[in-house]
Image (cartoon, helix red, strand yellow):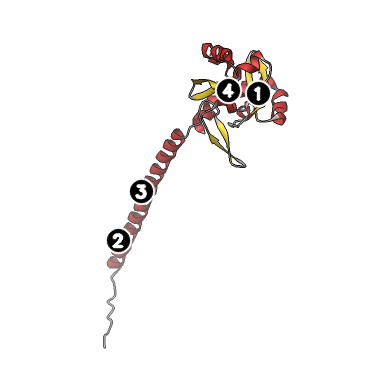
């Protein structure tokens, strides 16, 4: 049979084993910390790359997708004519025959005259905040719009999500416009 012989350790040997064990533990912790730091750095780098890659477009081109969803499309303000708000005093659907590309989006117009007006001064006719909901931007969010929830203030077109949000926006127009002006560019870059 086998016999296990245990030789007693001297105090020096016990201290040496304890030191080696402590060093081994510190080394293992350091390796785990280094791995965690490397993983965290990669994760942060990926998140920054993704957030830059998926920054919101400067013009709202959200389109209906399915029953409840929305996706980015290419047509601004759901194909409504931005000039009609100013010239006709109401929203009008644009026609595919009269389109312009500006600021990364396709804009539709009800007539050739409206297209010409827009092409000569797009900043004059394009809705504020890229056509995102003005109240939503003021509250810190990029939100889709209803082309029928609109208002012109100081010769600038503002669109809102719906009639309810439009009323909220109207309750403090100047304050909401000021807050939205302060937040809009940051929202585009962080979406």
Ranked by sequence position, the earlier of labels 1 and 4 is 4
Q: Nearer the viewer, residue 115 or 164?
A: 115
- Note whether 65 is above or below 186 in the view shown: below
Q: Nearer the viewer, residue 131 or 111?
A: 111
Quarter that holds the N terminus: bottom left
Q: Which residue is mark 4?
A: 95
Ranked by sequence position, the earlier of labels 2 and 3 is 2
Q: Position of residue 152 (x, y in %)?
A: 66, 17
Q: Which residue is mark 3?
A: 34
Q: CA distance from mark 2 to mark 4?
A: 80 Å
Instruction: Tell me the SS state at disc 4.
Output: strand
Residue 138 visible in the displayed image: yes
Tell me the mark number nearer the camera, choosing from 3 and 4: 4
Ranked by sequence position, the earlier of labels 1 and 2 is 2
Q: CA distance from mark 1 to mark 3?
A: 47 Å
Q: Position of residue 124 (x, y in %)?
A: 57, 13
């Amino acid at each position: 049979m086998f016999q296990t012989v245990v030789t007693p350790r001297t105090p020096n040997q016990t201290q040496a084993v304890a030191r080696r064990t402590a060093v081994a533990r510190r080394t293992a912790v350091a390796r785990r910390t280094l791995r965690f730091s490397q993983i965290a750095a990669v994760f942060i780098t990926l998140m920054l790359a993704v957030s830059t890659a998926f920054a919101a477009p400067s013009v709202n081109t959200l389109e209906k997708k399915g029953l409840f969803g929305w996706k980015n499309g290419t047509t601004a303000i759901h194909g409504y004519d931005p000039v009609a708000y100013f010239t006709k005093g109401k929203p009008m659907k644009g026609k595919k025959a009269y389109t312009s590309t500006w600021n990364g989006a396709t804009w539709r117009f009800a007539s050739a005259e409206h297209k010409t007006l827009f092409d000569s001064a797009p900043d004059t006719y394009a809705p504020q905040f890229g056509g995102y909901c003005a109240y939503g931007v003021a509250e810190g969010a990029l939100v889709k719009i209803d082309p029928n929830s609109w208002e012109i203030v100081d010769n600038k077109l503002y669109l809102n999500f719906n009639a309810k949000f439009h009323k909220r926006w109207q309750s403090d127009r100047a304050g909401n416009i000021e807050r939205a002006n302060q937040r809009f560019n940051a929202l585009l870059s962080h979406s």
